[in-house]
Image (cartoon, grey):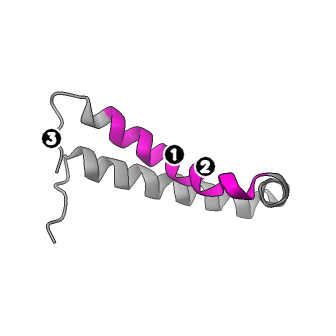
């Protein structure tokens, strides 16, 4: 399996997804009401909340002409 290069759109999308996940976890730990709100009203949207930033970063970087993909 070939890993993506550091300056690729894939790598940037993965890093952004990890950063969003860690930010979400910090918010969930720091604000218990936020965690309860997500669990009560939006449990199906949880993967979308966490992965949305990574997908958006990947899409934006794919359309940039100076960023290679993989």
Image side of residue 61 versus residue 38, left or right: left
- The alpha-carbon separation of the residues under discs 3 and 1 comes to 21 Å
Mark sitting on residue 49: 2
Mark 1 = which residue?
A: 52
Residue 54, x across and y down, in percent = 43, 48
**Vertical order, 61 against 49 (above or below):** above
Residue 33, x across and y down, in percent = 85, 56
4, 41: nearer the viewer: 41
Picture residue at 72% right of the left edge, 64% below the top = 29
Query: Which region of the structure is painted magenta?
Result: 42-60
Residue 69, x across and y down, in percent = 18, 45
The quadrant where residue 30 appears: bottom right
Residue 19, x across and y down, in percent = 47, 54
**Vertical order, 3 against 7 (above or below):** below
Q: Marks 1 and 2: in contact by CB < 8 Å?
A: yes
Q: Earlier in the sequence, mark 3 or mark 1?
A: 1
SS at circle 3: loop
SS at circle 1: helix
Magenta segment: does it hold 57?
yes
Mark 3 = which residue?
A: 68
- The alpha-carbon separation of the residues under discs 3 and 2 comes to 26 Å
Picture residue at 18% right of the left edge, 36% below the top = 67
């Amino acid at each position: 399996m070939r890993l993506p290069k550091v300056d690729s759109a894939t790598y940037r999308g993965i890093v952004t997804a990890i950063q969003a996940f860690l930010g979400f976890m910090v918010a969930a730990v720091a604000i218990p009401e936020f965690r309860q709100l997500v669990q009560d009203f939006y449990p199906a949207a949880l993967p979308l909340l966490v992965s949305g930033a990574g997908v958006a970063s990947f899409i934006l970087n794919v359309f940039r002409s100076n960023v290679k993909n993989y």
